Image (spheres, rainbow, N blue to C red):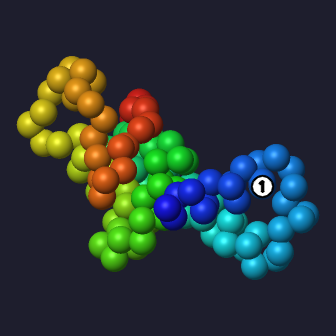
Amino acid sequence: MKTAIIAPVFALVLSGCAGLIPQNVNTAINNVNTTVAEVQTIARAVCSFVPTAATVSSLLSQWIPGLSTPQSIATSICNAVAPAGVPAARRARSAPPVVAGVPIHGRFVPR
């Protein structure tokens, strides 16, 4: 439900209609975009994985107390995509990992 509310806002901004949205909504969108970028930067540094913006936005929309900072979200994503002791080849063939009910999509990048 929350994702269904956030998605139209993102679509409106991406379509170039940002001038039609009240300023407080623009501020909220900018905050989300900043948080998404921070999570992606931290996850890249921690585990060489860059989650998609949609994945991070979905996690943010869940409002989970333990996932309230960019660091905690990135750490949860890294723990899900690179669990200790699981070979990379096996992770690549399995279903996407999940954090708080959200499938984690993204890509591994070279260190």
Say which residue appears at 82% left-offset and 46% top-offset.
15
Q: In the rendered image, which quarter is residue 19 located in?
A: bottom right
Q: Residue at x 70, y 59 (%)?
A: 9
Q: What residue is rendered at 43% in x and 33% in y?
A: 107
Q: Position of residue 89 (x, y in %)?
A: 21, 20
Q: Is residue 101 visible?
A: yes
Position of the C terminus by quadrant:
top left
Is residue 46 among what the camera can see? Answer: no
Q: Which quarter of the picture shows residue 73?
A: bottom left
In the picture as drawn, the residue positioned furthest to the left comes out as: 85
Give the number of marks: 1
Amino acid identity at mark 1:
Val
Q: Is residue 66 left or right of residue 69?
A: left
Q: Position of residue 108 (x, y in %)?
A: 39, 32
Taking depth in this image into account, of 15 and 84 the one nearest to the observer is 15
Q: Left or right: where does residue 92 sit relative to residue 106? A: left
Instruction: In the rendered view, tell whether residue 90 sits above or below residue 8.
Output: above
Q: Which residue is mark 1?
A: 13
In screen coordinates, is 93 left or right of 109?
left
Residue 68 image offset from top left, x and y in percent: 40, 73
Nearest the eye: 10 or 39? 10
Location of residue 86 in the rendering, given as x and y in whole percent from the top left corner: 12, 33
